[in-house]
Amino acid sequence: MSDLALAPLATTAPAKRRWRVVLAVAAKEWLELFRDRRLVWLCAFIMALMLAALAFGYVENARILREREAAAQADRELWVGQSAKNPHAAAHFGQYAFKPLSPLALADPGVDAYVGSAVWLEAHKQNETQFKQARDGGVGARLGSLSLAFILQTIAPLIVILMGFASFSGERESGTLKQLLSVGARPRDILAGKALALIGAIFALLAPAFIGAALALVFFVDRERLSIADQLIRLGALGAAYAAYLAGFAFLALGVSALARNSRAALVTLLAFWLANSFLAPRLATDAARAFAPTPTWQEFRAGVAQDKAKTFGHDESHPAFVAFRDETLKTYGVSRIEDLPVSFRGLALRKDDESGYVIFDRHFGALQSAFDRQDALRAAPGLLFPLLALRPISMAFAGVDSRSQFDFATAAEAHRRDIQNQVSDNIIHFAHDNSYVAGPELWRKIAAFAYRAPGAGFALDHSVLPIVSLLGWLALAGAFALFAARRLRPV
Amino acid sequence: MSSAFLSSAFLAGMRFEARVMRRDGAIWFALLILAGVALFALAMGASRVAAQQAAIAAARADETQRLSNLQKTLAQLQQGETQGKPAPEPPPYRDPRNAAFMGGGPAAAVAALAPAPLALVATGQSDLLPPAVRVTTGSKDSFLFADEIDNPANLMSGATDLAFVVVFVYPLVILAMAFNLLAGEREQGTLAMTLASARRPGAALAGKLTARVAAPIAVTLLAAAAGVWIFAGWERLASPGFAALLAVVLLYGLFWAALAAAVDGLGRGSAFNALTLIGAWVAITMILPAAINSIAAFAHPAPSRIDMVLAARAASTDADRARDASLARYADEHGGGGKPAGGPQEMTLRRLATQEAAFQRVEAIVAEHDAQLARQRDMADRLGYLSPAYLTYQAMADIAGAGETRYRAFLDRIRAFHVDWREFFLSRAKAGASLTAQDYAAMPKFTQADEELVGRAPAGLAGPLIGVALPALILAIFAWRGFRRCRI
């Protein structure tokens, strides 16, 4: 630090002069960061890595999007190309609902590879999403793949630590801290200057990647299907969340550096925290979430559904519920024989059975999602101390690739299945006079193709309140720690 | 190794360093953390294995229950027929005599992949691939892609297992122990004394390094042995798989020790060493594996599994259309309105023809997909030699029986069983024969030769072991040269 820049300053300096100290410290920090060629090369490498990750993400997204669009079209052709058959047989043939890919999956692929890409919409049954991409990746793929989120969540904090661990301790070791304090610079102002420099470096690190992502959105998003404004709002939220996450690391690095005996101790402490945050905490939090909010196995889940479904009649005409429904229907229409009904009793029975099933599926799938939500909340709870736990759900939610977005898609797909069931049952009710009744392609065409519009950024915000509070808490806590450490700053 | 090497300098260096380490609380703390995390990971692995075993047991109990119910209904139907009081005819999809329907679902056989003896060591793909599937006469897409229920965010985070501890945590402890052996002494001013006090300074330094890296390596090996003994039983310790596990952990540890020593041997300061080694750790354990996966996926993208389903559905609609065309021709040739004779058996045959068409198309697509995935994995495997972390992770998954080798073998066995299963039911359905009690007793069973897994080490580990050992050896040579040329 140049003595000339600080010489006129005193502890009682007015705000304008103190601000000059902050800027002078920041400028000196920037200069040092730039002079350290290792850090410059490292930052350049990370930037290149982020841009490469974005490019990989973009290519992968485009490929998946093409595949799913082609599959949706092919499935539609199969549906309308069915020959004349009983509408209930067509309901059994079913349709597929393909999950559209969120454009921001190019930055954060989230849970997409672990939830599957399509749901089969068939008669009588709500199905889970099938075809998890992660199954095909092989065991090595569990070590992750390059994505902007992966780099920003795990490697970027390390860069911030490397840039900041010697901020105070290095100056103390070289004797410049004593010099700085002796000319009247307040520790708080020095902290502000160093924080400004570090946060500025973080912005410089984030900017190319986020500008690249914004350009990808502006030029390549299908504006008929998606709102570009909504996508940019989502990207802005992502940028803010990552900035808060990394700024917290900057404050932490400064605080630890101010308190540590020497730079080595500061580095070891910060690296231990980084390791705990990036590797241990997510896995341990997942283990805890599994232990405290267990979910059923597939067998248990399906047995629970089957148990409730056994109370409905399905196609079993000897079931007491079927007999009761038949008697009630005859009474409603004022006739004594099924043959005398003005509508198809089979159609009425199918509709009744479907409606009973809807309640059961809502209960079981809703309970399952609630269990997932409890697990996610438990995982995010320690986010105040281990910010990755708070950042990840925010990042996935705003990128549209979290389990809540998945549930929204699955709910829409199920609504479409119910629409198919209701339409085919209504057709049978009104047109089927005997068991040989068949409907033709006009009915298949009348049933609309599945069209899903993902919810807006407000949906992500609604489901991210806890992690957002945790992340802001982390930033505030790290800032307070840095201030506390600056107050205890020792010149030697 | 010469006797001179083993003589005083090396051993004295080792003894001296061990004495220093014994008095360092931070070292004890790091070693305790490492052992604790390894044991915790094995405990988690044991609970995961128990859950897999429970899922398999539940699937088998369900199979037994289904078959028992079908056999009971079959007995009631047969009893009614013999007593002249036939029971109400069940619909074909619930009729235990109907081979076309029973093989397609109600009588489906459970094909299970029991956890391997050392499954607690690594999760591998076991949380993504279900431990049991229900094989039917349908095409593979209808049963092979069932998934166990799990929160996708849990799957994404990954499991705490020994493979994770070994690949990520273990090297950091080794690096922390060894990164500044020379640099630290140089900075403290004791290096000159150390070099002066030994007749063979290089050997003395090697002894000191050995003491430093032996501690975390030995702790990890001991924790692995203790964990396997506690959570899986002592007999697992005597298995070839466990010996392979020890070899993998040892070699991986030696690689990191050699890397730390090679960097230390460059003669730079502690800060340089620390930053360089952290950079190497990030590159080897995080960036390279991620880049390898991304490059392999980019070069050979995994094909969409949806194609399979669409092919099966297309086969079904094509068969429908063929039937319509046949009906139209029949009506044309027989004066309109008529339907071909045959009744329910005719319907069954058409249904089977549709199934067969779907089966053939799906088989072709599965083969095509498998070939594409094999290309992707081959490329990833080749690139994997760039990262010892990648190789170690794969080797540990193979030892745990949760890697690709065992799953591929499982899928091959399912493929063969599927053929037998289809043959059993479809031959009867095509012949119009009803299933009998004898048929139920003679249904094909999916068997797994678990004992063969216990007796031998997992195959294919030689490549990964050499892939880790070779760079370790090269780095050790660099380290040795650095130690010999050591400057004060």
Image (cartoon, coloured by chain):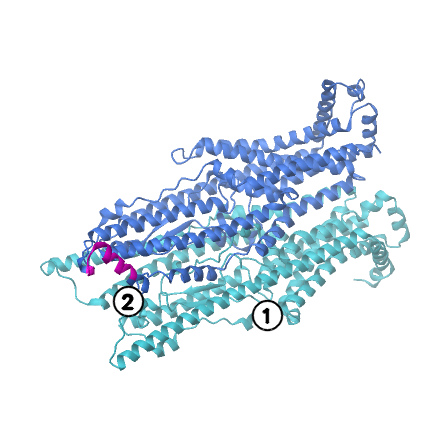
Chain colours: A blue, B cyan
- Give the side of residue A219 with respect to residue A4, left or right: left
Instruction: Determine if residue A147 is in view.
Output: no
Write down the quadrant of residue A159 in the picture. Answer: top right
Residue A455 or B438: which is nearer the viewer?
Answer: A455
Chain bearing mark 1:
B
- Secondary-structure class at tag 2: loop
Residue located beneath label 1 in the image: B456
Residue that mark 2 sits on:
B91
Q: Which residues are magenta?
A: A324-338
Name the spot of residue A95 as percent of width and height, x first: 34, 50
Q: Nearer the viewer, mark 1 or mark 2?
A: 2
Q: Is residue B279 above or below residue B108?
A: above
Mark with earlier residue (1, 2)? 2
Badge 2 local density, few (<14 within 10 Å), some, or many (20+)?
few
Residue A145's place in the image compared with A230, above or below, is below
> Is residue A342 in view?
yes
Q: Label 2 lies in what chain?
A: B
Quarter where residue B488 is shown:
top right
- Disc 2 marks a residue whose amino acid type is Pro
Q: Residue at x 31, y 71 (%)?
A: B427
For the residues labelled 1 and 2, the Cα–Cα distance comes to 50 Å
Q: Is residue A257 magenta?
A: no
- At x 36% / y 79%, what residue is drawn? B438
